[in-house]
Amino acid sequence: MAQTANFSKAVRLGLIAGIVALSVSAIGMVQTFDVRDIITGVLTLGQLLLFSTALIAGYFSWQKGEGVAPVGAILRGLVAGLLTAVPPIALIFLTIIWPGIRNSFVNVSADLIEILTFGQTPVVGSLMLLVVMGVLGVIGAAFDLLPKRIQKPLFSGLLWTLVIGLLSEILLLILRPYTPRAVLNFLFGAKGITPITAVIIFILAVGISAWWDAQGKQAMQQRRAEMAPAKAKQLRRLNIGLGVAFVLILPVIMGTYLTEVADIVGTFILMGLGLNIVVGFAGLLDLGYVAFFAIGAYVMGLLTTQGDLGVGGLSFWAALPFSVLAATLAGIILGVPVLRMRGDYLAIVTLGFGEIIRVLVVSDLLKPYIGGAQGILQIGKPEAMGFVFVQPEHYYYLILAGCLLAVFVSWRFRDARIGRRWMALREDEDVAEAMGIRLVSTKLMAFATGAAFSGLAGAIFASRLSSIFPHSFNLLISINVLSLIIVGGLGSLPGVVVGALVLVGLPELLREFAEYRMLLYGALLIVTMLLRPEGLWPSPIRRRELHAADIDHRPDDSEDAKSMA
Amino acid sequence: MALLEINNLHAYYGNIHALKGISLTVEEGEIVSLIGGNGAGKTTTLRSISGLIPPKPGAITLGGEDLSQYKAHHLVGKGVAMVPEGRGVFAKLTVLENLEMGAFHRTDKEGIASDLEKIYKLFPRLAERKKQLAGTMSGGEQQMLAMGRAMMSRPNLLLLDEPSMGLAPVLVEAIFDTVTEINKTGTTVLLVEQNAHMALQVAHRGYVLQTGAIVLSDSAKELQRNPMVQKAYLGIE
């Protein structure tokens, strides 16, 4: 009985993985991703996506501590892997029996079937798929049989190989100016890394990881423990200095395209830092955050454009304070009516506010003043002592300065009395008031600061693109910013940076994802919330709160009665 | 002059006339209990004092000063601290952070530190659990924390709303012992309780509320002997 009960998990997981494999195939993801090679001629991103389902299903098909013998574990992996292949195989034959399926599922094309069948006939291809999936399932299951000290290096080897393979285009872009052609041809294929490179990276990663676990970590900790406090401080300063230097020379290393991406990420970091104050610090869920971004951008646009709509014809620097001020005022104006709202209601009202701004901007009513759907063109560029900011590299430093300012303000506010007021507000409004905290000014301060950062981001954004259009300021921006601070870790400053890199930077770099970006967002959000609900780089408070159960030492009432008596 | 004086206080929830003109006084250094059944208006009285419900009409004065001009968050600065019903601790903050939050309006660092020590002496249980999340503690510990946090604002008048609610009998006794202790250090206490038996044991004087009006007021000892109170609230036939 127990045996069949255990197998039911493998069956269930296998079928789920199979349905996932079927879905990603049918919506065209496998096919789109197949264009990008990870290891030239060996593995494409599409195949990785398809086959990882079997591997993962195999890995989770049994659990240590269930008293499963090694043979049983491998059998479970095999079952899970084979079952993963069943739905895709069904799809292959369905296309033969009923060719009309392509009318409903446009992505189920001949190309997709070719990928699924390895370019063979349906029968042979299906058998191959079955075998490959089965083997992967077994590998996945067997992986957990290995001792931990072998598992970890193997996993990091695999991960590094895949990550470097995935980012090969970017690496190539960075390395090209400095590296001889012959070396590049050796390391990189037409797309992706060459098999030799893959093997080298794998071996290196495995080796380093194994060494680190065996000795390196201990040696490092020991050295750090023995170090004199003054020297440790010196080392920390050196690390910070190196970090700053790295960020400063980054545009030189990255080249124009990657710097452009960094600019986009930076803009989102700036917005994320603002929303982090509102949502992360003060706990006020704001879904209309894009409104302040739009206001910052439009004020900058109107004040500096050389077009017909221009008002004042100010320079970038003269217009910047007005942009930020306008956004801040908008934050306060939004804040006043929602002072009495909480939770869900607050979210809905702010959502409405964001939409109002967007609708106003495209409306015919305001078209004579702010350009309607045609937007604003010829927006001014910043100029400093005869130097005009044009290139992404120039804006990189401008955005960096903005982010640093925002980080500094966030950090000082968090540790000041206002930060404590926000914390109390976030935890419990009523009790905060009972502690003598003025809710009105506390909430308005959060909205105003958050809006100011967003306005700053909008102003720089408008100037960088030198034209703005209403459709750039849709709800999706609000959602993106909210997602990135949640994935990074609510209330955490480094978390905002990590979240923006992962949720904005990666999709920007992996252009194949573009079509599936929302899918990626959804999947990433779900996975993050399941595996790391506190975010990738959480603040200490969130970590504590979500892991309180692990360190639970709750005594029952009778016990505390004893100690009190 | 009484520390707290309430004169002909009325309060409404929409159309419901919750308080029908109650008057009471609390003298400096006293423990005064407000007892009564469900819906008698006990909590409403406390909410009116702390400015969460506007009195209409009616006057509430603290040390001769009209309280109705102040909003809820001003009261802490006026020396009034409230421990709300159901404790209301910051569940996701630690014990220490909760206590520090209680001293939010104060800026005297040394005074705060010495008061913290006093609280730990009063509730040794809290000293053992400085780093624990408030929400993971037992009901009794949370009640202690809520009281300790209120004391951190150095109040003249402590308003306690149903401190015994949902606690085991042994704990209830311990909590009321602490109320007496707190009172001995010079804090005046206004206590709202359904547990009339315990409330009248620690209090100097008591008021009995019934459907929004005060029906009895006397010293706690006399109230305990009063046949009507015995029958209705103490369960003595």
Image: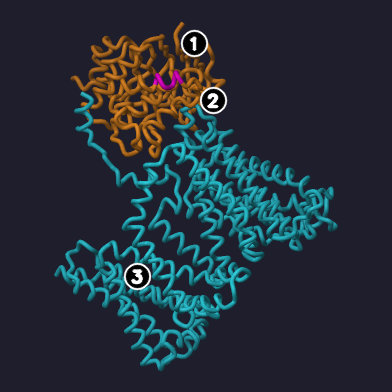
Q: Residue at x 65, y 58 (%)?
A: A473
The disc at residue B63 is: 1
The crowding category of the residue bearing disc 1, from other C-alpha atoms within 10 Å (few below 14, some 14 to 19, many at least 20), is some
The residue that appears at 61% across and 68% down in the rendered structure is A178
Q: Which chain is mark 1 on?
A: B
Query: Judging from the image, what secondary structure is the residue with disc 2 in?
Result: loop
Q: In this figure, which residue is indicated by the disc labeled 2?
A: B71
Reading the image, the residue beneath label 3 is: A56
Query: Magenta stretch: residue B111 in it?
Result: yes
Q: CA distance from mark 2 to mark 3?
A: 58 Å
Q: Nearer the viewer, mark 3 or mark 1?
A: 3
| Picture quadrant where residue A149 is located | bottom left
Camera-near label (2 vs 3) is 3
Q: Position of residue A468 (x, y in %)?
A: 72, 59
On the question of residue A346 being in view, the answer is: no
Q: Magenta segment range?
A: B110-115
Q: Nearer the viewer, residue A104 or A274?
A: A274
Residue type highlighted by circle 3: Ile
Whether residue B215 sits left or right of residue A289 in the image: it is left
* Front residue of this view, candidates A548 and B216: A548
Marks counted in the figure total 3
Instruction: Tell me which label, 1 or 2, sits earlier in the chain.
Output: 1
Q: Is residue B228 rendered to the left or right of residue B32?
A: left
The residue tagged with tag 1: helix, strand or loop?
Answer: loop
Q: Are marks 3 and 1 on the same chain?
A: no
Q: Colour of chain B?
A: orange
For chain A, the rendered hue is cyan
The chain holding disc 2 is B
Q: Are marks 2 and 3 in contact (CB under 8 Å)?
A: no
